[in-house]
Image (cartoon, rainbow, N blue to C red):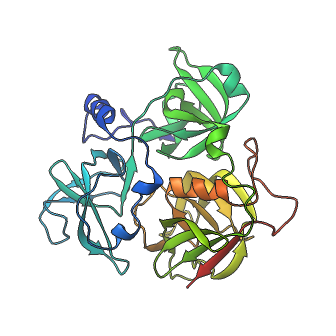
Amino acid sequence: MRKRRTTTIGAMISRRSLLSLTAKGAGALTLAQIPVYNAFAGTSAVAAPLPFGRVAVWGYALREKPSFDATVVKYFDYDEIIPLLEQVTGDPLGAHKNAVWFRTDGGFVHSAWMQPVDNRPNEVQPKETAKAKFWSEVSVPVSEAHYRPGSTYYSHRLYYGTVYRVIDAVQDDDASWWYRVAEGVNGGGYVKAQHLRRISPEEIAPISPNVENKRIEVDLPTSILTAFEGDTAVFHAPIASGTRKTGQFTPGGEHRILYKAPTAHMSGDLGTEDGYDLPGVAFCSFFTAQGVAIHGTYWHYDWGARRSHGCVNASNDTARWVWRWSNPIAPYESGWYFPKEWNSGTKVIINY
């Protein structure tokens, strides 16, 4: 059981300056803004993917220049929120040569342990709409799943872009609105209504549903996912794949998308160095019976790395596109969707 902090926004910038910067910032991340090749080769500065970044590790260094040899200005705390002023190229990290850095107030941070985020509170949906159930995503940097509306204690922190099913709307003793969520975080809970944005059916409607001969190729040496319709590539994006540890390889060869889920609470190896506890993992397209999937990622921004437990990590936007475009087609109202015809989904080829 965790007690609520005094704020869910990091100490780097105040709530007033956060809202001011958001009003001036860019809109939601588009696929064209996701770094693909410029994540691995020298490019000039470009706009940051989103106006803010959430620090996803303790003690992350702010440096004077985009170089690991540069002087450390300070260290950030976990979940601290900082402005992302632009994306630049600097020293590469690791064998995958992730050279993406972000310029922020006072210096530069490498992208690997940052989550680009926005801060867009929402109007509360009518109680009838909530009771009818809808899918939602967190639209602020950090929220929490509480044990009851207005409770001081919470079970999990919920991060920007993660997905949950809303099943009710209730008010606390101060007349503030909360959504009750039932999928995406184990045990459910109550989330401040303004922190969750309703995902309409149109936003996750199928893409090119009548096109045949679709396939997805994931090239692990270059860490690029490409979607094909026949011989025509219609989409590509960077990914991160499984580590080289035993049991954590991304399985090579030919597979099929077997089942899907708009959200999943993924956890495993708890209490160990490799442990993970990740609510709200967005738009999961599972291509092995053991649960290996293409899915959204919010705990790093390290494309090209080998750092998953076998799954194909992608941005939330990439995972959503794959989920919409590939077969089987999951109805909006479904949760975990298993098609009647097993092994009939879109082909997934993992190339080593």
Q: Quadrant of the C terminus?
A: bottom right
In the visual, does 159 lie left or right of 133? left
Residue drawn at x 71%, y 75% is 255
Residue drawn at x 15%, y 72% is 69
Q: Can I make out residue 271 in this image?
A: no
Could you tell me residue 144's position as x and y percent? 50, 38
Where 112 sits versus 222, above or below?
A: above
Residue drawn at x 33%, y 78% is 94
Could you tell me residue 212's position as x and y percent? 75, 65
Extreme residue toward the bottom, this view: 352
Could you tell me residue 301's position as x and y percent? 40, 61
Q: Quadrant of residue 19?
A: top left
In the visual, does 221 lie left or right of 267? left
Relative depth, front residue between 213 and 275? 213
Where 51 sits versus 67, above or below?
A: above
Relative depth, front residue between 61 and 29? 29
Q: What count of labels does the image hold?
A: 0
Where 42 sits versus 127, above or below?
A: below
